[in-house]
Image (tube, rainbow, N blue to C red):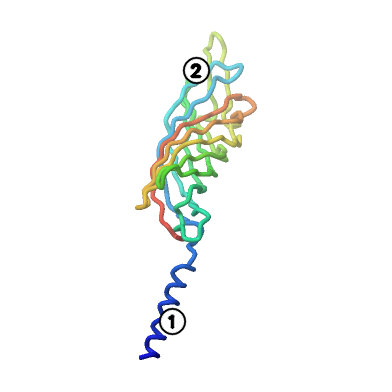
């Protein structure tokens, strides 16, 4: 009986120690896909009267989310105030002009810091690295036979830009996500097209937790 009581006491002490010395992992890593619509707009280029207006496009790709825990030993992972989201996106950005629509196929890589105001809602901010892969049409033609024609080559729109991005993101425990962002352009499209493109976008997606 004495031996049994001693062994049960030792087991209880061991279980208690294990319970209180286990430290949760410091973060949760999730990966997934997302997609949505954007509205791009730009100012009128210098020396040209193109009648530049905004237009609707789309974007989609993959996302990786890191959600940290608070600096407490017993706080579950992925429940802290801070996180980071990195995405690799293909974006179609479109603009309207007096003569033809400008369609730009772009890549975009947002690297955003997140501050969670609630367990599911985060404020996001950071740079978005983007560049134009191709454009359509190859040139814009303005004017008439009487006034003469002006040709503006769009094949030179290959510029790289670091856009300033701010927005909000919703991250449900089920994996469903939704976000709304504004991207402020900082670089001209090309040397012959001095106009900065900005955009507003909404997206939805799904993230799978692979480390928690």
Residue ID at (52%, 48%):
84
The extreme top residue here reads: 146
The residue that label 1 is drawn on is: 10
Disc nearer the start of the sequence (1/2): 1
Residue closer to the observer: 107 or 30: 30
Residue ID at (50%, 32%):
136
Q: Locate residue 170, reporting x and y percent.
A: 40, 43
Residue closer to the observer: 15 or 187: 15
Q: In the figure, is residue 160 to the left or right of 76?
A: right
The residue that label 2 is drawn on is: 51
Mark 2 closeness class: few <14, some 14–19, many ≥20 residues within 10 Å: few
The extreme front residue here reads: 2
Question: Which SS class for mark 2?
Answer: loop
Q: Locate residue 61, reporting x and y percent.
A: 46, 46
Q: In the figure, is residue 39 to the left or right of 146?
A: left
The quarter in which the C terminus is drawn is: bottom left
Q: Locate residue 121, reporting x and y percent.
A: 41, 43
Mark 1 closeness class: few <14, some 14–19, many ≥20 residues within 10 Å: few
Q: Quadrant of residue 58?
A: top left
Residue closer to the observer: 76 or 190: 76
Residue ID at (59%, 29%):
189
Q: CA distance from mark 1 to mark 2?
A: 82 Å
Position above or below: 155 against 70 = above
Residue ID at (50%, 21%):
52
Question: Which SS class for mark 1?
Answer: helix
Position above or below: 172 against 136 = below
Residue closer to the observer: 197 or 86: 86
The quarter in which the N terminus is drawn is: bottom left
């Amino acid at each position: 009986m004495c031996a049994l009581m001693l062994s049960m006491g030792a087991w209880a002490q061991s279980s208690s120690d294990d319970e209180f010395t286990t430290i949760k992992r410091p973060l949760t890593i999730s990966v997934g896909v997302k997609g949505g619509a954007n509205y791009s707009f730009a100012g009128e280029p210098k020396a040209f009267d193109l009648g530049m207006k905004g237009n609707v496009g789309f974007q989609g790709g993959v996302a990786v989310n890191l959600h940290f825990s608070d600096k407490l030993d017993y706080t579950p992972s992925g429940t802290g105030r801070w996180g980071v989201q990195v995405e690799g996106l293909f974006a179609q950005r479109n603009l309207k002009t007096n003569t033809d629509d400008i369609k730009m196929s772009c890549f975009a890589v947002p690297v955003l810091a997140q501050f969670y105001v609630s367990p599911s809602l985060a404020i996001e901010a950071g740079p978005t690295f983007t560049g134009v892969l191709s454009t359509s049409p190859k040139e814009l033609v303005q004017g008439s036979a009487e006034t003469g024609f002006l040709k503006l080559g769009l094949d030179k729109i290959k510029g790289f830009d670091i856009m300033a991005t701010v927005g909000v993101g919703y991250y449900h425990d089920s994996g469903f996500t939704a976000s709304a962002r504004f991207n402020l352009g900082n670089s001209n499209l090309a040397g012959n097209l001095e106009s900065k493109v900005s955009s507003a976008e909404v997206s939805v997606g799904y993230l799978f937790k692979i480390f928690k």
